[in-house]
Every structure is written in C-alpha cells, then in structure tokens.
Amino acid sequence: MEDRIEQLATKLRAADQGVAFTGAGVSTASGIPDFRSEDGIWQDHDPQQFHIRAFEQDPAGFWDGMLPVYDDAFDVDPEPNPAHEAIATLEKQGHISAVITQNADELHQSAGSEDVIELHGSMQEVVCQSCKNRKPFSDARSRAESGELPPECGDCGGPYKPDGVLFGEELPKRALYKAHALAEKCDVFLVAGSSLTVQPAAGLPETAAKQGATLAIVNLEPTPLHDVADYTFREDVTSVLPALAESV
Ligand SMILES: [Zn+2]
C-alpha cells in the first residue's frame, strides 16, 4: 500500500488542482450512521418520514417524527476524525482546492476545510420555506421540542425545513454545478468513503476520469468505478488519508 500512496502523493504534488469527494464512510468513522443506506438508522425508523412529500403534507408531523430520529443519529456529539483532518490538511497545503461531500454533518468544516461543497445540504441548518432565511438547526430544534410545531421563521412565519436534502428532493443546483465544474477541470479526483452508487453525485468521478484526471478511490467496499480508477484502496479512510497527507 505504501508504494501506491507514494505514487498518488506524487500525482497530487504535481497537480494544478486536486479535488476530494467524500461519502458516508468518512462520517461513520465519527459515529454517524449512514442516513441513505437501507440498514443503520432505518432499522428503527421509517424512511418515508424523511420524504419531501411528508414534509410538504404535514410539516408539524414531520418535525414531531424527526426529533427522535435526529436524537438517535446524533446522540453523541460527533467530532471530526483523522480522515476529515487529513482532507483539511491537504487543502491547507494547497494540494486540493475543495471537498465535495455527500455528508450533511458539517464535520469537514469543523476539521478546518474551507471550500466545502455540500451536495446533500446541511443537517446543522434549517431554511425557511417562504423567505429562505437560514438558522442553526439547534434553534429550530429547541423550539420544536418546546411544542412549536413546525418551528416557524421569525421574519415571515414560514415553516422551517432542515437544509439537509430529504428523500425525493433534488440536490441543490448550485452545489451540483460547482461540483461538475471541478470534476471537469481537476487533475486529481480523490474519492473517500463513498460506494459511488447514489446518482447524480456518483457521475462526478466518472466525469473527472473521462477528461483525464487521476482517479483514486478509498473505500472498504468495491465500487462500480473499480476498473476505471487509477488507484483503489480497499482500506479504512482513517488510515489511508492521513498517510497520504503525510507523504505529499
Ligand atoms: Zn421566512
């Protein structure tokens, strides 16, 4: 493995632009369950509760049902792990220019990453559905817990929705546009902790590889791009990424 990490480090050193792309596997190392997989959190809760239609039809019921799910998912105060820290280090060193993430927990920002493109929004914020005013999730949550269902915008009275992308909801267009632009011009595209099965995000590494970027994938399970990638590491993200940040 060391040889291949050294080779990848050489590619990153020579790159004009490197990009990291992260999925649930980077968050699970911090104790956060994988929200979009079929097992994990959905063993005990109904995913239809998190569908955009459930919110639109009954915002009060949505919030009432969501609070215990949220408690289950974030009962420990999650902290960034060595994979988040290594990605932040790579950005500080100038070897990657941004991290595109499918995670909605803001742990990349906590670790010090500055350019974070959130394809699935953020579960740490809420957005007013009328005026698009944003507030910390914790504000809306404490109001919901004290009986304000749904929690409403202080400016216009519209209902707050978690910024995190719900089932059945489209990915934020601006984030997706930025992510595509990076995939089309980067020299190195580094995937970490994603099984690359959730579209349209999974198309990004393919775009990068097609235009000639070096594609590296760090994921315990095989991915559909196994044969396309220049480097694959079927290893833990918390061991490969720190080793890469060290050798680059
Ligand atoms: Zn509002």
Image (tube, grey):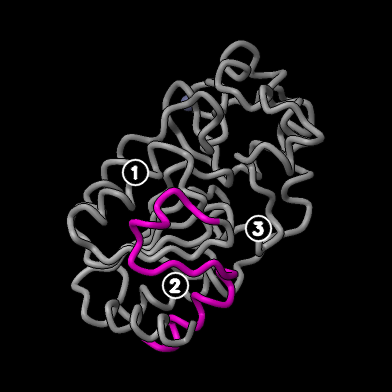
Residue 61 appears left or right of 169: right
Q: Is mark 3 within 8 Å of ligand 1?
A: no
Q: Position of residue 219 (x, y in %)?
A: 53, 61
* Distance from the alpha carbon under mark 1 to that under mark 3: 23 Å
Residue placed farthest to the top in the image? 57
The residue closer to the viewer here, 222 or 47, is 222
Dot 2 corresponds to which residue?
88
Label disc, if present, on residue 28 of the rendered structure: 3
The residue closer to the viewer here, 30 or 151, is 30
Residue located 47% across and 57% down the image: 22
Residue located 65% across and 58% down the image: 28
What amino acid is at disc 3?
Thr
Q: Is residue 1 above or below residue 104?
A: below
Q: Is residue 248 above or below residue 111?
A: below
Dot 1 corresponds to which residue?
203
Residue located 55% across and 21% down the image: 52
The residue closer to the viewer here, 197 or 122, is 197
Specify the segment rendered in magenta: 222-248
What amino acid is at disc 2?
Ala
Tally of marks: 3
Determine the image quadrant of residue 53: top right
Residue placed farthest to the front in the image? 227
Label disc, if present, on residue 168 of the rendered structure: none
